[in-house]
Image (tube, rainbow, N blue to C red):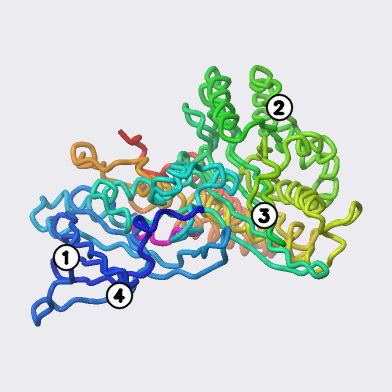
Amino acid sequence: MEVADSRNKLHSRLRLWEFPDQYVIEPADGSGAQCLDISRLDASMKLIDQVPECNSVRVPKIHAIYGVVGMLKLLAGSYLVVVTESERVGSFLGHPIFKITTLKVLPCDHSLKNSPEEQKKMETEFSKLLSVAEKTTGLYFSYEVNLTLSSQRLHDLGVESKSLPLWRQAEPRFLWNNYMLEVLIDNKLDQFLLPIIQGSFNSFETAIGRDIVDVTLIARRCTRRNGTRMWRRGADLDGYVANFVETEQIVQMNGYSSSFVQVRGSIPFMWEQIVDLTYKPKFEIVQPEEATRIAERHFLDLRKKYGSVLAVDLVNKHGGEGRLSEKYASVMQHITGDDIRYLHFDFHKICGHIHFERLSILYEQIEGFLEQNGYFLLNEKGDKMKEQLGVVRSNCIDCLDRTNVTQSMIGRKMLELQLKRIGVFGAEETISSHLNFDERYKILWANHGDEISIQYSGTPALKGDFVRYGHRTAHGVVKDGWSSLVRYYLNNFADGTKQDAIDLLQGHYIVAVSRDMAPVPQKGGLEAVANFPVALFVVLISFWFATMSLKQTGSDYKHKHLFFSLLWTGICVGVAALVRANGRIFCNRPRLHKPRS
């Protein structure tokens, strides 16, 4: 009953014909439906009855593709994005789910030949961002079921809504290609409109006695304030927060289906960390006078979508994080009530870096809320027996590492309650009682955390060894150290370009000739040659010379070597100071800072 009407069914098999002057997308699923013709001159679209004839002049390249992601318009050309490779990763409510492994951008830019030279240069700069976009990870789709909605929301859809095309059923905030689909929507191409989510999808089956239990974990990333770790923090004026992810845990067995939803998202007021090459840039609260209004908008939206809300704040009470936590607690005093509650839990102080079992202290404080607001449950006849009435909203600074450990603990406790309700577990039975179940459940959440983390920070989640194995390991600590260094590099020298690509794909930045053709200041002097590899090379060479000089201990050269040691040390300090003071020179900062009009 979750599937769209057959008249709006998506084409699941497609064939792409690349002619010199046009692209033709032919349904190859035996439906006999019309083909989609796209001009390579101006990206105009129309439906045609069959593929045009080929000849010696018009020899096409032919590829199998698995969906049309959408169309992007830049200064002069447009660019078609298609799925060229995908793999089946499981099922959602009985329908196949696929992960995108390869995207391809197809230019419709022949009109660029007649454009001014400066416009061609700018088009090339923007089109380079599309190569970054091709590497987007964590994209999932289904030809048959709406992945943007939780099981409970899907069940509650009216009959009329369920008959609509999948893109019209979709929750816009979780529809990753929402902006790119606009051109296809305008052309009424419902059977080619493939809704895609970004997030994660993991599942496993295991036996408990004679029963087979199927557990699925789905993450849906919100597109409203999407981005990379240091370039998207806090909330915007509308209350949309960075790294907002809805996580749904589904268990199915013996005809029963039950799900539990929780969410994560950045601290909901305006704050930022300006990348300046320090390891941990200073936290800055922006427009503090607006904080309460922004947070109120955020929580009212959550209240409307999920019911009661329990905000669990996991950040430190002291230091830079403490300032944010203090402001958050102050703001929540004006918002909390019967339906919105706030709880601070200093994760690092209570759990340290190894004692994550102390999260039981947190569970004792939120257990009443979880039991009161419950989970969604359908019996073997498809009748609703329970519904989830509220949601736990967790956050740390990045909403990655501490948050994932905490959410996995909450998910485990709720799954045990669900299995007891269905009758699989006895009153005292737990997941830990079944070694295979326990091991696979840990892996499920660890993989989930890694995928969400890679999308936001570029690396797997920290503290993942605890989620994966149930305790901290020496290998996990070393891996966390390496991941922290990689995050530092990406934040400073790669994520700016990635942020531009995200903004372009999701319509947060609309390319406009009048604005983007403005002359770009030319770099000169040091800025023309300065970059991270050069800075790093100079610093390393400086340290090497200083070390070699200090190793010389001959009395005849004592003063000379002392002089050179101080000289090279001074160079090191000078370069470091230059890098620190001129972060804009060395940092890879986003260029597309104008909002969508």
Lower sequence index among marks 1 and 2: 1
Nearest-to-viewer mark from 4 and 3: 3
**For mark 3, what is the residue?**
257
**For mark 4, what is the residue?**
63
Lower sequence index among marks 3 and 2: 3
Q: Are marks 4 and 2 in contact (CB under 8 Å)?
A: no
**For mark 1, what is the residue?**
22
Look at the numbered disc 3 and give the secondary structure of its residue: strand
Lower sequence index among marks 1 and 4: 1
Q: Which residues are magenta?
A: 129-137
Residue 32 versus residue 522 in the image, above or below: below
Q: Neighbour class for label 1 at 10 Å: few (<14), some, many (≥20)? A: many
- Farthest bottom residue? 56
Look at the numbered disc 1 and give the secondary structure of its residue: strand
Q: Are marks 1 and 2 in contact (CB under 8 Å)?
A: no
Q: Which kind of residue does numbered mark 2 sit on?
A: Arg
Look at the numbered disc 2 and give the secondary structure of its residue: strand
Q: Which kind of residue does numbered mark 3 sit on?
A: Ser
Marks 1 and 2, Cα distance to the nearest angstrom? 57 Å
Q: Which mark is residue 341?
A: 2
| Left or right for 150, reference 336 | left
